[in-house]
Image (cartoon, coloured by chain):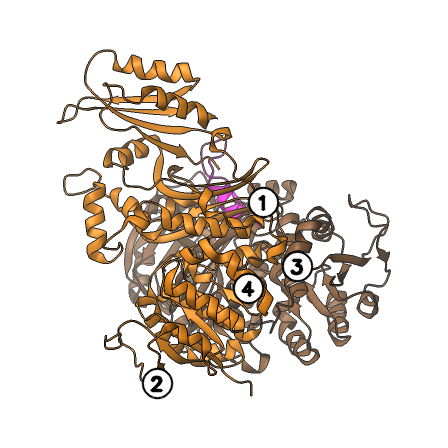
Chain colours: A brown, B orange
Amino acid sequence: MTKPLRIALAGLGTVGAGVVKLLDANAALIERRAGRAIEITAVSARDRTRDRGVDLSRFAWIDDTADLARRDDVDVVVELVGGSDGPALTLARATIAGGKSFVTANKAMIAHHGLELATAAEAKGVALKYEAAVAGGIPVIKGLREGAAANEIDHVFGILNGTCNYILSTMESPSVSGHGRDFGDVLAEAQALGYAEADPSFDIDGVDAAHKLSILASLAFGATIDFDSVAITGIRHVKAADIAEAAALGYKIRLVGLGEATSKGLFQRVHPCLVPVDHPLAHVTGSLNAVVAEGNYVGRLLFQGRGAGEGPTASAVVADLIDIARGETGPAFGMPVASLAHLPAAPAGERRGRAYLRFTVVDKPGVLAELTAAMRDAGVSIESLIQRGPAADGGVLIVLVTHDGPEASVAHALEKLEGSPSLIGAPMWMHILDS
Amino acid sequence: MTKPLRIALAGLGTVGAGVVKLLDANAALIERRAGRAIEITAVSARDRTRDRGVDLSRFAWIDDTADLARRDDVDVVVELVGGSDGPALTLARATIAGGKSFVTANKAMIAHHGLELATAAEAKGVALKYEAAVAGGIPVIKGLREGAAANEIDHVFGILNGTCNYILSTMESPSVSGHGRDFGDVLAEAQALGYAEADPSFDIDGVDAAHKLSILASLAFGATIDFDSVAITGIRHVKAADIAEAAALGYKIRLVGLGEATSKGLFQRVHPCLVPVDHPLAHVTGSLNAVVAEGNYVGRLLFQGRGAGEGPTASAVVADLIDIARGETGPAFGMPVASLAHLPAAPAGERRGRAYLRFTVVDKPGVLAELTAAMRDAGVSIESLIQRGPAADGGVLIVLVTHDGPEASVAHALEKLEGSPSLIGAPMWMHILDS
């Protein structure tokens, strides 16, 4: 009889409680699959008294989370505290230094400190696993690290934040008035439903998706994580009018994280994009996540599922634990840290593509000529243009779709228009996903 | 420096040549990911003289495939010969008995002899891996075996045969005449394009999909493979009219392999199904494959990609080799053979669902009454009915969609109508995928 794998759990929020529930509910099956029992021995969280709907009296309660790393009755520490630094990072370092394996759902910590932790884990011969950090229950870390391992991957992209996807796809639904719904309205609803945090900025400003993208890019391209070079734009400025105009043009709007290995280096961007309605990502609605990777032999792979929440995240955490129990572990980023390439950040300006541009302008003669002249002077070729009659507030909506061309030209045109008294508010620039 | 992993390759058809090309093209990357080089040392195939577009002179040529298992310069044998028995099985047994790991793309052999081979591999402490056997390059074996390992899975279904999916989705395209295209016409085109074999019966009669389904069901449910209990219907009898009527009702027709773990046991069926147009499987077109698994914590997972062909299949074979090189291997079916459940076959008759029924009937009074009476007498409740005016050949098309009800009742109604002089040809019964 093989000995149980003994787990310490740091953090007993939704996901932590979910891990306890899952290990209870599926215990017999997990023991068959893992070849041994997986048992929690110790737990730690801020508030001992809170009712989490699970019986914690079976486990040792440890007041100081960092003490979990030093216990003799623990083989693996699972960190579900969150935060890129602070107690989570202290615990990670102490656990690995103490020669125990470490499992986490913490995308921020992996994005910022993954390389340091992987280096330490290699030196100590322990596992560092983080399937739950990206795309919740979808086994996309495993899919890239192992499933697609035979391939040179040249781009990876996906819908990596369920909160944003819920908001954008809900904005598509007709409201009571028959029109698409506004961002603020849907965000408030998402907060009430628990799909968005009280402070939603990490999600809606694209930071969470960028953390995940930087991890996926590392795995896909065999490169060190470079979170700082991700260009990030969130969805705060997407209007109901953008959703409607995109729909009229045959697109959905999705927050897309995109990583590309180019001849100039690594390009990483999180940005609201127009996705053709027949593209697989256009069918990804609500809080679902999806990741597409394109390999030179396998072609295009799509992974889709629930990207967050108690059950999916707990499923990914326990999948990591089963791998460890089976002894099926290896380098955290799919190769030894020393083998990872250090790719320079590729400049966005050299990319080409089509763009969606939305302007709100004052209703007076000559404005359209001013806009189109700016485009012409910057060398931006216009594929289609829609002008809508003045809205109740007097603003006139102009939507441009450009032909394929350098992104730098579009940036140049927008710079020239900056500060123009014809514009009401900042223009909205979204890329069109043509891949 | 770790020693290379030394490979013998049996079978040098499209996939075998693809494995040689992939190991050449991505050699440096694979060495970084695997932690060691993966090198072919010996190859074997029927015809030594054929030009396969790759340089084979570097490798030992072995005339008798079975000799590969006995070579000292080989750590892993890759079998790409095909066939459930014969040389492939002989080689598999000899390789494992000789204490070497075995990688195969052979779904028929795994479906029929996987348990025997897994038992032998366990006894010898070697790996038996077969990612390429199901859904080509999509890492769905890994996804179920490892990614979803924490979950009780209650059903798994998918599009598992690219040939059938190519034919069915091409039948949807308007032909020159503006109508959907006929099965025979599209099959001939698929054969000319290399998407269908000269003898396509294993594909179009659903046997290939059934092999794959039985493997997925074993992994999903932690049960022994039971290929013999898969109920199989192919796509030979799907007509252009079925595609058109399904479209009018809001469905696509797909060949779906479905496995369910029910309280009565294991239910497995391969059958052409009506899939709602907004279902993820409806978007799976051409030769793509897709697999959906539903776990009690992770929810619904979707894996999609290219299900066959040189590149995708080679990608899956080499992914298995990288796992072996990394030492990340374990029981072939996700748990020791002794832990696999022996589930009885669950009878189809106890299932419930909605059905699509298409009849071609003679154009005379009373036929509709005869049909509807048979339904009523069997307790089948009709949700919708379409009758089309007589076609050029005089036959009248009647399409029924039933309400949700026992499949046994539909079978009973069709039995009662069997041999009726009102029917021209056999009725077509397809299930509606409501999950």
Q: Earlier in the sequence, mark 4 or mark 2?
A: 2
Which residue is depicted at the point 57% across and 48% down? B221
Which residue is depicted at the point 43% across and 47% down? B158
C-alpha span from label 1 to label 3:
41 Å
Residue sitting nearer the eye, B229 or B292: B229
Residue A159 located left or right of residue A357: right
Residue sitting nearer the eye, B123 or A211: B123
Q: Amino acid at mark 3?
A: Ala
Total marks shown come to 4
Q: Amino acid at mark 1?
A: Leu
In the rendered structure, the residue with mark 1 lies on which chain? A
**What number is the disc on residue B58?**
2
Image vertical order of residue B372 relative to residue B402, above or below: above
Q: Are marks 1 and 3 on the same chain?
A: yes
Image vertical order of residue A231 relative to residue B293, above or below: below
Residue highlighted by disc 3: A34
Q: Earlier in the sequence, mark 1 or mark 3?
A: 3
In the rendered structure, the residue with mark 4 lies on which chain? B
Q: Are marks 4 and 2 on the same chain?
A: yes
Helix, strand, or loop for circle 3? helix
What stretch of residues is rendered in magenta? A163-183
